Amino acid sequence: MRAPFYTLLFFLFGSFFVESAAQPGSERMMEKGWRFTREDPAQAMQPGFSDDSWQAVTVPHDWAIYGPFDAHNDLQKMAITQDGQQEALAHAGRTGGLPFIGVGWYRLRFTVPEFTPGMRASLLFDGAMSNARVYVNGREAGFWPYGYNSFHFDVTDLLLPGEENLLAVRLENFPESSRWYPGAGIYRNVHLRVTSGLHIPVWGTQITTPVVREDFARVVVRTTVEKPAGMESSSVALVTEIRDAQGRRVASAKSGLTRFDEGVIEQHMVVEQPALWDTDHPHLYTAVSRLYAGETLSHEYTTRFGIRTLEVIPGKGFFLNGKRTQFKGVCNHHDLGPLGAAVNEAAIRRQVRIMKEMGVNAIRTSHNMPAPELVRACDEMGVMVMAETFDEWKSPKMRNGYHIYFDEWAEKDLTNLVRHYRNNPSVVMWCIGNEVPDQGTVNGPKIARFLQDICHREDPTRPVTQGMDHVDVVAANNFAAVMDVAGFNYRSHRYRDAFKRLPQEIVLGAETASTVSSRGVYKLPAVRRSMAKYEDHQSSSYDLEHCDWSDLPEDNFIQHDDLEYCIGEFVWTGFDYLGEPTPYYTDWPSHSSLFGIVDLAGIPKDRYYLYRSHWNDKVSTLHILPHWNWQGHEGEVVPVMVYTSYPSAELFINGKSQGRRTKDLSVTLEGSDNKASQEAFDRQKRYRLMWMETRYEPGTVRVVAYDAQGKEAEVKEMHTAGKPHHIELSADRSVIGADGRDIAFINVRVVDKEGNLCPHDSREISFTVQGAGQYKAAANGNSVCLTPFQSPVMPLFSGQLTALVQASETPGEILFEASAKGVKKARLVLTSTPHSVY
C-alpha cells in the first residue's frame, strides 16, 4: 500500500561566517610564520624547543602534495568488496601514491596585543588532516580526529597577554584510512578570534525565514549570547540590523536579555520586497548583530544569509522558491589537483565557475565536510550544495577509517557541520553517509535515524539524505524509509522499483554515471565497454566506457527526464581527483581518477560538452569529437560524434556529406531498458548525434547545426593538425589580486602554424615567471604522469597542460614564459592589483 501523501517543507536562508572584527577584539587568519617538520620530537609542543631547522611554510599547507609519487605510499592489499572484488589485490595508487601517511608538526610564534584580562580567545581550524592535537604555550588546548571537519577551542586560559605565544599542532595520518587522496597537514585556514567577555560565540547565530512571500519575508534571528559570570542579564542588549547587498538597512530589532532566555535571544523582523536567493540570482543579505553591555558596544558579529524556500513534494519533485528544480549536480572530492588538499580560494572558484558554465546547479561534497571557501563561493555564484559528512559509520570499509571514531565523535562532527553551514543559502540538503556498510546491518536504520535527528535538532529547515547502493536491502529493512529523501548511488534502472517500495515517493540520484575517459584519448572500435583496460592505462573519450556498477550519462539523463519523481542527479565526478584510478586499481603508475568530466588540470574532456548540451540552456553547444589526426588509419572507420544543444546537424568530411542526424526523441525509458537497445546506442541517439561508419581521411571535418525550425544555426570545423609550430597561452583571468594567495591558471597548448591543436604532442614545456608573482605548479591531466606538480618542466598530455602562477603581495606585472624544444616559445603578461578580484 502506498504511504499517505505528505509534504516535507523546508524554508531556508543563508550563510554564516564572521565578516568583520569584534569591537573590541579581532579575528585574523594565521597564515605566515609557520615552521613544519615530518619528524615527531617529544618536546615539540614546548616553547623552549628549537624549530630553527624546520621548514618555513605558509598555511594552508599540504605536506604530501610535494611527493614524490611512489607505489608503496599507502599500498593497500585488500579486496574492495563493494566493487565486486573477491580476493585481496595490491592497490598501489588508490590514495594517489603520495606520502601523506605519518606524523607532521606545525609551530607558530605570535603575539596578541589586543588580548587583555577579561577578554576571551578561541582558535578555529577550518580543517587539519588529521588527528589534530593542538597546544598553546606547551599546554594541550584540545584534540580533534576528523580531518575534514572544522573545530574550535577556547584558549583564553592558555594565552599570555602581552607576551609571545606558541601554537603547536601535531597531526598524524594512519595507513589504510582513506579510499582516495586525503591530503595532509593544516590544509585549511586557521583563525584566532579575540572578543570581550560578553560576546556571540563561534557559529552563534541561526537565521530562518518561516514565511516568504513576494511582498515580504519574515526573518527570525536566534542569537546565542555568552556573558561573564556575575554580569546582570538586564544590562545586556542586542541590536540586529539586516542589510541588503548594497548595504542599505532593510530591517532591525533591539532586544534585551533576561535570565529566562537561557542565553539565546530570538528576534523577529520583516523584510519587504525580498530579493530571493536562487541559482540564477544569488541575492544575499547581511545580519549585523551588536551586543551592548549597558551603553558600551561589546561585540559586533555579522552573518551573511539568503532568503528562499525549499519544498520536497512526494511524486512531484524538489521546489526552490516554488519552482520545480532538478539537481544538475556533480560530486567532487576536496583536492584541487596540483595544489593537493591545500585550500585556495581562486582554485575553488575556478572549479565552481567551470561547473556553472557546464550547467551545474549543485555540488555534493563527497564524501566529507566542505571547506568554507567552497560554500561561500556557492552562495555567491548560485550553486546548491549537498553537504556530506561520512564515508563510514560503525562498520568499516578501511582498517583505519572513520568507524574507529564514530561512537565518540559522530555527534560532535555532525553538530559542527550543521552549525557551521546552517545559514548558508547554497546548502539545501545534509548527507549523512555514503554507501555505508551499516545499511545492511540490524542497527543500520537506528543509526540513520540518530544522525538524521541530529540534523533536524540543529536545523529543522533542510531535508536529510544519504547515498545508498543496495536497493533491495535498504527497502526491505526500513533503512531507506527512515530518510527524508531516498538517495541512491548508481543502479538507476532500480529507481522505479525504489519508488514503488518506499514511502517518500521521491528518488534522488545521489551518485550517478561513473563514466571513465582520458582527455584526448580515443579507442577503436567505439563500442560500449565495462571495466575496459588498455596498455597505456587510459580510457576512451568516446564516452562509452564505465564500471561494472555504473552507467553512461544518457542512462541517467533519461531517468530524470522521464520520471517526475526523480529530483535530479549528482554525477561522479565533476573533476578528476587524486587516487581511485578505476579501472586500473592495481596498475601503477595509475594514481588519479578517470571519472571526471574535467581532468585533473581543469581542462574539460569531451564529456563536458555532452552535459553542457543537456544542462545549460543559456548558451548553445556544438562540439565535435574525436580529434582528426589519425595518421596510419587512413580509410579505416573512425566514428564521429557531436555533442550539441541543437536538435540536428549534418556532418561533412572534406566537403562530402556524411548525412544528417537528428536526436531521436522517440526513445523512451521503458523502450530502451534492454540489452539490445543499449548495444544499439538507443539512449545515446536521444542525446548525442553519432556517425558510426565514417572513414578517416586527413583534412576538414565540418558540422552544420540546425535549430528546431530546421534553419541553419551554427557551423563548426575541425582540421587535421600539421607539424607542431608554436606554443599558445591563455589565462583564466588576466588580473589577479596581489595578496600572496591568488592564482592564475594558464592553459598551455602546442599548435600548428594555423593554430590547430596538435592532439598527440607530449613534449616537455619549461616555465619561467618574472615580476610580481611566482611559478606555483603545473598539471597535464595524465593519470600515469609521475612528474612532481611543482616541477618547472612538465610534459604535455594530448597537446595541453595547465600552469599555475601565484601573485606576490606586491602589485605589478607578472611575465610568464613557456618554452620547449622544436616549437616557438610564448609569453603572457598578467597584472596583479591590490584589490580583490575574486
Image (tube, rainbow, N blue to C red):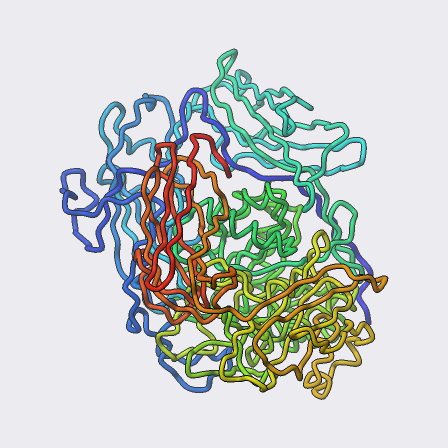
Residue at 80%, 65% in the rendered image: 3
In the image, residue 668 sits, relative to residue 269, either above or below, namely below
Viewer-nearest residue: 580 or 190: 580
Residue at 14%, 38% in the rendered image: 48
Viewer-nearest residue: 832 or 44: 832
Residue at 48%, 51% in the rendered image: 730
Residue 703, given in percent of the width and then of the height, sits at 69, 68
Residue 489, given in percent of the width and then of the height, sits at 60, 69
Viewer-nearest residue: 709 or 257: 709
Left or right: where does residue 625 sit relative to residue 685?
A: left
Tally of marks = 0
Residue 74, given in percent of the width and then of the height, sits at 32, 70
Viewer-nearest residue: 23 or 651: 651
Residue at 46%, 83% in the rendered image: 534
Whether residue 363 is visible:
yes
Of all residues shown, which one is farthest toward the top?
A: 295
In the image, residue 276 sits, relative to residue 590, either above or below, namely above
Whether residue 179 is visible:
no
Residue 591, given in percent of the width and then of the height, sits at 39, 70
Examine the image and state in which quarter residue 553 appears. bottom right
Of all residues shown, which one is farthest toward the bottom?
A: 676
Examine the image and state in which quarter residue 672 appears. bottom right
Quadrant of the snapshot with the N terminus: bottom right
